[in-house]
Image (spheres, rainbow, N blue to C red):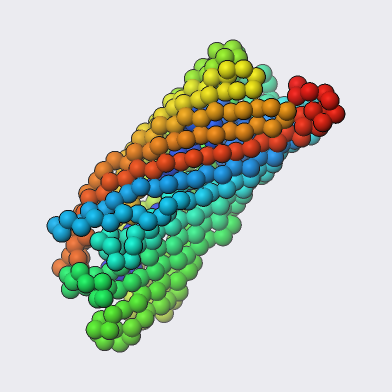
C-alpha cells in the first residue's frame, strides 16, 4: 500500500504547465497589463504566443527581449495542529526572446520566431515545515519554440500560424509521513523528475475586421495526446521503514504518459480611432480530456505499474482590458481576468494552484527612436481553499490544511525596430 501512495503523492501536483493549474496570466507585458484581453489587439511579437494572426502588425525587422518576475505568496496552515508554513521561493524569472521581419514586402506579411514559456510559479516550503506531507518543492517548466507567419489577406481578414516544439520538465519533492508520526526523522523524502523534449505541435489564429472600429478573432492550439515523460523516482526511507521493505533508498526509472488538452482563445475589440481600445476575451481548456497518468516503472521491485486518475474539470478564463494612446510615444493600459477552478476539491494539495483565480493588471509603453519598452504589473488573488484529508490517512498523516495565496508579476520588455533605429542614426527621425 505504501508504494502506490508514495507515487500518488509525487504525481498529485505534476500539472502541465500551461493554462489552468499553472496559469499566472497571459504571456506578454501588454497582454498582462490588459488582464490578458489582448487576443485580437496584440501588436508586439508576443503574437507568436497568443494569436499568430496579429503578427502582421509588426512591420520592419524587430528583436524583442522580455523578462517576467513572479513572486508567489502562500501560507499553509495545518489542521488540526494549527502550525503554519510559508512559501520560501522569493522569485521566479522567465525570459522570452522573439525575432520577426516583414522582408520589406508591400503586403502585410510577417515571419517570426520565438522562444518563450508560459508563466508559472515554483512552490518551495522548508523541509521540516507542516506543509511537507503535501508539497516541499514543485516546479513545472515548459519552453516553446515557434516559427510562425502572419498574412493580412484582405482589409477585413488576417490569418497566421505555424509549427511549434515544446519541451517540458516536471520536478516534485515531498515528505511522506508513516504511522501518523509528525517527527521529520521518520519521514520518507520522495523525489520525482521527468521530462519530455521537443514534442511537435502547431498554432493557428484569425482576426476578422468587419468595420474600422471593430474586430474579433481567436487562436487554437491542438491537443497533444500520449506525451511520454521519462525520468526517475527516488525515495529515501528512514531506518525502521527500510527494514520493512529491505532497502533504505528506492530508485527506479519511470515513464508517465499524459495528454495535453487543446487550448482555445477568443476575443472581440472595439477601437476608438487612434485614442483607445476596449477588448473582452475568453479562453477555454478542456482539462477533462486529461484523464490521468499512465505510469510505467522499469524494475517494479516494490511498485507496480498503475494509472493515477485526476478528475480535472474544464476551465474558462474571462478577460477584459483597455489600452489608451496618450500620444505617439506613450500608452497606458489596465484590465482584469477570472479563471475557473481546474482540480476538484477532493484532490487539492498544499502545492496546488489549480483553484479559481482573479487578477488585475496595469502597464505602460514608451516608444522613442525605434526602441519600445513595455512594463506591466499584475496582482493575482488565489481563492482560498482547504486541503482534504489524505485518502490513506490510516497509515499517514492526514494532510488536512488551509491555503491562502496570491502572487505578483512584474513584466518588462524591450523591442528594437532596426529600420527605425537606422533612420534615426542617419538623421531621418523616428517616423516610418
Q: Position of residue 422 (x, y in %)?
A: 81, 32
Identify the image quadrant of the C terminus: top right
Q: Position of residue 75 (x, y in %)?
A: 29, 51
Q: Nearer the viewer, residue 183 or 241?
A: 183
The residue positioned 45% from the left and 66% from the top of the image is 193
67 with respect to 371 (left or right): left
Q: Position of residue 199 (x, y in %)?
A: 56, 55
The reply to whether residue 415 is visible in this rendering is yes
299 with respect to 405 (left or right): right
Q: Position of residue 156 (x, y in %)?
A: 63, 19
417 with respect to 141 (left or right): right
168 with respect to 395 (left or right): right
The reply to whether residue 202 is visible in this rendering is no
Q: How many marks?
A: 0
The residue positioned 49% from the left and 40% from the top of the image is 410
Classify residue 23 by image quadrant: top left
Classify residue 131 by image quadrant: bottom left
Q: Nearer the viewer, residue 187 or 422?
A: 422
Task: Tell me: residue 134, above or below residue 353.
Answer: below
Identify the image quadrant of the N terminus: bottom left
Task: Tell me: residue 325, above or below residue 135.
Answer: above
Q: Nearer the viewer, residue 416 or 146?
A: 416
Task: Tell me: residue 150, above or below residue 287.
Answer: above
The residue positioned 25% from the left and 61% from the top of the image is 130
The residue positioned 69% from the left and 32% from the top of the image is 371
Amino acid at each position: 500500500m505504501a508504494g502506490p501512495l508514495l507515487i500518488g503523492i509525487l504525481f498529485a501536483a505534476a500539472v502541465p504547465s500551461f493554462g489552468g493549474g499553472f496559469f499566472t496570466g497571459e504571456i506578454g507585458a501588454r497582454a498582462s497589463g490588459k488582464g490578458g484581453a489582448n487576443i485580437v489587439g496584440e501588436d508586439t511579437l508576443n503574437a507568436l504566443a497568443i494569436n499568430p494572426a496579429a503578427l502582421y502588425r509588426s512591420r520592419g525587422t524587430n528583436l524583442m527581449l522580455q523578462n517576467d518576475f513572479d513572486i508567489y505568496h502562500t501560507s499553509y496552515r495545518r489542521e488540526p495542529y494549527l502550525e503554519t508554513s510559508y512559501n520560501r521561493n522569493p522569485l521566479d524569472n522567465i525570459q522570452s526572446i522573439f525575432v520577426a521581419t516583414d522582408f520589406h514586402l508591400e503586403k502585410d506579411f510577417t515571419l517570426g520566431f520565438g522562444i518563450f514559456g508560459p508563466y508559472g510559479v515554483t512552490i518551495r516550503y522548508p523541509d521540516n515545515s507542516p506543509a511537507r506531507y503535501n508539497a516541499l518543492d514543485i516546479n513545472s517548466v515548459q519552453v516553446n519554440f515557434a516559427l510562425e507567419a502572419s498574412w493580412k489577406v484582405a482589409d477585413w481578414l488576417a490569418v497566421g500560424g505555424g509549427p511549434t516544439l515544446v519541451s517540458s520538465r516536471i520536478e516534485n519533492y515531498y515528505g511522506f509521513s508513516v504511522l501518523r508520526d509528525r517527527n521529520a526523522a521518520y519521514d520518507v523524502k520522495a523525489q520525482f523528475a521527468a521530462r519530455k523534449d521537443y514534442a511537435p505541435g502547431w498554432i493557428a489564429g484569425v482576426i476578422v475586421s468587419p468595420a474600422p472600429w471593430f474586430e474579433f478573432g481567436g487562436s487554437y492550439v491542438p491537443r497533444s495526446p500520449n506525451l511520454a515523460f521519462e525520468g526517475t523516482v527516488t525515495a529515501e526511507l528512514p531506518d525502521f521503514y527500510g527494514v520493512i521493505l529491505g532497502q533504505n533508498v528506492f530508485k527506479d526509472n519511470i515513464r508517465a504518459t499524459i495528454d495535453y488538452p487543446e487550448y482555445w482563445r477568443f476575443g472581440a475589440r472595439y477601437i476608438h480611432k487612434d485614442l483607445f481600445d476596449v477588448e473582452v476575451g475568453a479562453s477555454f481548456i478542456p482539462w477533462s480530456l486529461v484523464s490521468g497518468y499512465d505510469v510505467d516503472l522499469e524494475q517494479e521491485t516494490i511498485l507496480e505499474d498503475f494509472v493515477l486518475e485526476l478528475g480535472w474539470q474544464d476551465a474558462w478564463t474571462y478577460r477584459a482590458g483597455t489600452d489608451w494612446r496618450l500620444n505617439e510615444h506613450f500608452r497606458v493600459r489596465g484590465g482584469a481576468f477570472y479563471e475557473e477552478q481546474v482540480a476538484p476539491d477532493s484532490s487539492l494539495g498544499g502545492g496546488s494552484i489549480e483553484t479559481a483565480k482573479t487578477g488585475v493588471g496595469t502597464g505602460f509603453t514608451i516608444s522613442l527612436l525605434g526602441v519600445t519598452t513595455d512594463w506591466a504589473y499584475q496582482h493575482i488573488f488565489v481563492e482560498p481553499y482547504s486541503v482534504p484529508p489524505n485518502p490513506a490517512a490510516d497509515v499517514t498523516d492526514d494532510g488536512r490544511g488551509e491555503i491562502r495565496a496570491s502572487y505578483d508579476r512584474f513584466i518588462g520588455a524591450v523591442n528594437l525596430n532596426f529600420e527605425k533605429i537606422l533612420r534615426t542614426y542617419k538623421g531621418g527621425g523616428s517616423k516610418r
